[in-house]
Amino acid sequence: MKIYNTLTRRVEEFVPNEEGKVKMYTCGPTVYNFAHIGNLRTYLMEDVLEKSLRYAGYDVMRVMNITDIGHLSSDADSGEDKMLLGAKREHKTVLELAKYYTDAFFADCAALNIKKPDVVQPATGCVEDFIRVISALMEKGYAYFAGGNVYFDTSRLKEYHVFFNFKEEDLEVGVREGVGEDANKRNKNDFVLWFTKSKFEDQALKWDSPWGVGYPGWHIECSCIAMKYLGERVDIHCGGIDNVFPHHTNEIAQSEAYLGHKWCNYWFHVLHLNTQSGKMSKSSGGFLTLNRLKELGFSPMEYRFFCLQSHYRKSLVFSEENLENAAVAYRKLKAKVLALSDEGEADAEAAARYRKNFADALGNDLNTSLAVTAVYDVLKAKDLSGSAKRALIGEFDRVLSLDLLKREEKEETPATSELSAQEIEAYIASRALAKKEKNYAEADRIRDLLAQKGVSLVDTPSGTTYKIER
Ligand code: AMP
Ligand code: ZN
């Protein structure tokens, strides 16, 4: 299997450290809001990667973190904590917020047939591991204490920018707005491993540590969680392209400083899903969720098909029109598959040829649109019986996971509520007014009332939106 490696900037033959086994790590979501369909594109393509590796015969062990502490709103070290901001916005504790959005994330993944990783580890469960690794970095002279925080000293490395030649616009979500300089840092790129002091309001969750009561930085989470479950060597590490810098760059810096050897061989990054007016990001507020797509009449499988039609290393522009085109094609494809007869013999030789086309498409840097074409080729094949076609398509769908052979028990109806959109908007306006007047009891009453009617409110920096629960 060949795959593009961001580290070497080449398509390379994938060779894991241990024959037949793959250790795969995925940066999980920051659970302060719903995942948007851009985030989901990344998880969806990572799912195809995992399933392609399994299809190629590897035994894959996949680990994912859940960022429920320490993700700063600027992605530099001086931003306000996203979890804390979210908890304040929704009048929840940080842990309640994390649970709510973690469950919502896995519900979206399930709807999109994204397999849950073998290990899912919230960062709050691993604080002892973070402290142990940070202590070792201090002992080795790779970290220093200044102004109440522990920083990683990037000047101690032979090479810090291991991923070079990146275009700024590709990284734009990672490098966020208005970040002031932190006077405690010895070098511009140094980053926080442990906070006891933040210039913003105090963190809700704090732990004792050798450096005082505080909380970990974001980057240390992934290094420690990966090491805890995968050992000292990771084969492939995944994330969206914005993770390249600073997150993955810092993960490599601290992991290799700690271990004293190379940590991860292959880096897999998914390019962004953009709207026609630019990037889609959680912190900007204006984003689409999977539930919103359902309200617009699209099924999760149609969105999955839309994603699979383009290459993960190309930015993908989302528009309702583009999704509609994909949805029409998906429905036609599925109808053809379901109409296949169950008759005829399987021709092993012919089947092997089609199987090879499919495997070659995936093995060619995960060319998912060609893999979908391989399904159409099977449908059109003159040398395959109906039953052979069904069997092959069923096999391919173990990777594509498009439910091509699944008959719907009943047509999915779009989510509805007994309230009209106008009524819901009126409630939202009354609640905004109550909040403005600091009448939080009334604001909460309206939220609860809507919840009872199956409408859940989502407060974003640009206003309140809602989603209708089934
Ligand atoms: P977050 O929950 O913000 O930490 O992001 C979760 C994942 O989604 C990360 O791997 C990000 O790199 C990725 N991501 C963020 N924005 C986008 C986007 N617009 N398109 C695709 N992936 C994205
Ligand atoms: Zn990570």
Image (cartoon, rainbow, N blue to C red):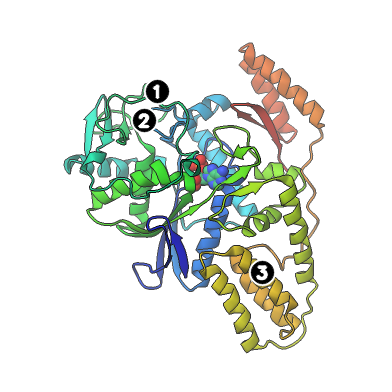
Residue beneath the point at 47% across and 58% down: 118
User: Is residue 29 in sight in this rendering?
Assistant: no
Q: Is residue 294 left or right of residue 227?
A: right
Q: Is residue 135 left or right of residue 174?
A: left
Residue 293 point in image, percent of width and height: 71, 45
Front label number (3 vs 1): 3
Q: Earlier in the sequence, mark 2 or mark 3?
A: 2
* Mark 2: secondary structure: loop
Q: Is the residue marked 1 within 8 Å of ligand 1, measured from its CB?
A: no
| Residue in front for this viewpoint, 178 or 419 | 178
Q: Is the residue marked 2 within 8 Å of ligand 2, measured from its CB?
A: no
| Residue in front for this viewpoint, 366 or 192 | 366
Q: Are marks 1 and 2 in contact (CB under 8 Å)?
A: yes
Q: Which residue is mark 3?
A: 373
Q: Is residue 185 left or right of residue 284?
A: left
Write down the quadrant of residue 188 in the picture.
top left
Q: Which residue is mark 1?
A: 202
User: Is residue 182 in sight in this rendering?
Assistant: yes
* Mark 1: secondary structure: loop
Residue 12 point in image, percent of width and height: 42, 66
Residue 295 point in image, percent of width and height: 75, 42
Residue 251 point in image, percent of width and height: 35, 46
Residue 232 vertical placement versus 384 (above, below): above
The residue type indicated by label 2 comes to Lys
Q: Which residue is mark 2?
A: 206
Find the distance from the CA under tag 3 to the CA under tag 1. 53 Å
Residue beneath the point at 57% across and 65% down: 367
The residue type indicated by label 1 comes to Asp
* Mark 3: secondary structure: helix
Q: Is residue 431 left or right of residue 245?
A: right
Residue beneath the point at 74% across and 60% down: 330
Residue beneath the point at 48% across and 48% down: 241
